[in-house]
Image (tube, rainbow, N blue to C red):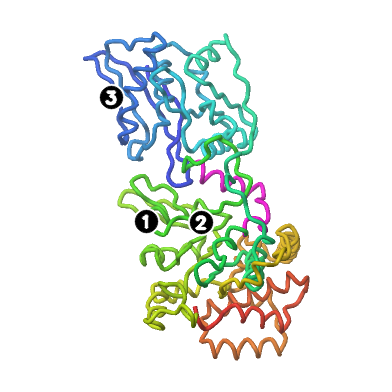
């Protein structure tokens, strides 16, 4: 007799069904797992043996073979413990095998038979629901799985509860969907707390209203990091679809400790020592990187020139495609990576280039060498570039820093509403885009109509600044966002002029 249990394997955000087949046959006592398991899966037999022993169940002195089909698909992770254990118990007639046919099972076992949380529960639950199956998962992950829709979910705390439920002596209720309480551990500063820097605040508002990329350059202590940390406070909330996508990625990465759905836009700020796999994704198990964890949110790179050159260059393709492709010898994994890039840098290594009182003796070469660490193609992908000068004593002495984030956020939401309404008639051509920054180049000229004066100004500026085709279209998108903030249906000359002001020759 062969007992079968359904479970899954993960390849990026793709979920692949796996058939756990357990057979007990005559022969020398052995416990063998086949089907291309990794080290964690191969060690499952010891955890399963100990968990069953904790329940008073002894394995028979026979040959026990576990096959994970398809055999050519790599199996990684500890979530195979529970399906293997249930398959063994079904083969021993401890639990009825037919009761498990419609369930997808995931869970890691402790030696005392308790079931520990595992990564990937939300995509597994969505996969189960789309195939008219149900789900068995750890109790700690039940609130996460409940967001997958109308499917039966069993979330036992240990193996004994699950056995009792299968035999009808105990009833496990369906877990309730819950929101994560740890997705925003840091307080978001208010824009009114930033003294001075009105131009940078304006750039931040345009960035939020159109989903653009922003580069800030200024001396140390001018407020670049604080401005970036204010951005989540003026961004729109996640839509239900976006929240589900973001939560799926964090579920695969194992960063949903309470198993709840993420409800705020991610804000990721990796240190400049981050490696290429940490930023883009990869490693031994091709995990999602920071750019995928920032999906539908913000990736803030402080001290941009201090990042490794190869690490920065790896951002160029994801910024264009919205996807991170992790290529390995044995697999190619794609993660979504549609994020806003916010970067901050000093004008030179000492940070005071252009300051007559504090400028170093190596200027201007120190600034040229420092800024040369950022390639032209990467710099071309920043829609807005703004100088953030040192804050004056007069600015620090003011009682108020200006508008509150709540006021700015209201304008941002209004502008985003105009964009969504405008793009509704072009859904086929827009490819699902709903903000100006994601507007395809082919649609820019069709949607953004300029008058003769604006077109002449833009053409002269493009020739003088030697703008690339990418920069030209990005500038038009920024001008469209500025017009949306002014609640204007048409892009006017002063909107183009303001957009040009955010592409200085220096930086």
Mark nearer the N terminus (1 vs 3): 3
Q: Main secondary structure of the magenta part?
A: helix
Residue range of the region highlighted in magenta in the rendering? 231-251
**Helix, strand or loop at disc 3?**
strand
Badge 2 density bin: few <14, some 14–19, many ≥20, Cα 10 Å: many
- Residue 303 in percent (x, y) is at 45, 65
Residue depicted at 73% across the width and 81% down the height: 492
Residue depicted at 50% across the width and 68% down the height: 220
- Residue 347 in percent (x, y) is at 47, 75
Q: Which mark is residue 4?
A: none
Q: Which residue is mark 3?
A: 32
**Helix, strand or loop at disc 1?**
loop
Residue depicted at 56% across the width and 24% down the height: 154
Pick the front one: 392 or 249 = 392
Disc 3 and disc 2: Cα gap in Å? 39 Å
Q: Which residue is mark 1?
A: 275
Q: Which mark is residue 337?
A: 2
């Amino acid at each position: 007799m062969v007992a079968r249990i359904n479970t899954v394997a993960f390849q990026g955000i793709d979920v692949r069904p796996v058939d756990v087949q357990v057979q007990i046959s005559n022969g020398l006592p052995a416990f063998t797992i086949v089907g291309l398991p990794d080290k964690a899966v191969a060690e499952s037999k010891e955890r399963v043996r100990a968990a069953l022993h904790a329940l008073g169940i002894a394995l028979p002195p026979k040959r026990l073979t576990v096959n994970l089909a398809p055999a050519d698909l790599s199996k990684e992770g500890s979530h195979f413990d529970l399906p293997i254990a249930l398959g063994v118990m079904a083969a021993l007639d401890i639990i009825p095998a037919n009761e498990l046919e419609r369930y997808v099972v995931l869970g890691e076992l402790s030696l005392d038979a308790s079931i520990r949380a595992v990564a990937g529960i939300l995509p597994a639950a969505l996969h189960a629901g789309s195939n008219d199956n149900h789900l068995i998962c750890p109790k700690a992950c039940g609130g996460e799985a409940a967001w997958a829709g109308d499917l039966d979910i069993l979330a036992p705390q240990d193996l004994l509860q699950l056995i009792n439920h299968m035999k009808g002596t105990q009833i496990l209720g369906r877990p309730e969907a819950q929101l994560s309480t740890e997705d925003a551990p840091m307080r978001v500063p208010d824009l009114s707390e930033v003294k001075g820097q009105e131009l940078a605040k304006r750039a931040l508002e345009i960035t939020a209203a159109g989903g653009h990329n922003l580069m800030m350059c200024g001396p140390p202590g001018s407020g670049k990091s604080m401005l970036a940390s204010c951005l989540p406070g003026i961004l729109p909330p996640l839509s239900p679809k976006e929240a589900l996508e973001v939560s799926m990625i964090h579920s695969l990465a194992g960063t949903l400790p309470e198993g709840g759905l993420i409800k705020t836009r991610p804000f990721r700020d990796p240190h400049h020592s981050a490696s290429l796999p940490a930023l883009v994704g990869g490693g031994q198990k091709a995990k999602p990187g920071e750019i995928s964890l920032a999906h539908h949110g913000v990736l803030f790179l402080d001290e941009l020139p201090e990042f490794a050159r190869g690490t920065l260059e790896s951002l160029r393709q994801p910024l264009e495609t919205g996807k991170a492709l992790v290529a390995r010898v044995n697999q190619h994994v794609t993660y979504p990576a549609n994020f806003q890039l916010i970067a901050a840098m000093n004008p030179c290594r000492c940070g005071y280039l252009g300051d007559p009182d504090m400028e170093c003796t190596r200027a201007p070469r120190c600034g040229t060498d420092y800024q040369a660490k950022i390639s032209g193609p990467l710099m071309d992908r920043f829609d807005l570039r703004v100088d953030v000068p040192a804050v004056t004593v007069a600015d620090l002495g003011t009682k108020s820093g200006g508008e509150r984030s709540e006021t700015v956020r209201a304008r941002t939401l209004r502008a985003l509403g105009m964009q969504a309404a405008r793009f509704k008639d072009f859904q086929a051509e827009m490819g699902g885009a709903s903000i100006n920054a994601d507007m395809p180049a082919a649609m820019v000229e069709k949607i953004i109509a300029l008058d003769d004066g604006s077109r002449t100004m833009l053409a002269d500026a493009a020739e003088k600044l030697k703008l690339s085709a990418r920069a030209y279209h990005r500038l038009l998108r920024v001008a469209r966002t500025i017009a949306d903030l002014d609640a204007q249906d048409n892009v006017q000359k002063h909107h183009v002029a303001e957009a040009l002001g955010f592409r200085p020759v220096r930086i």
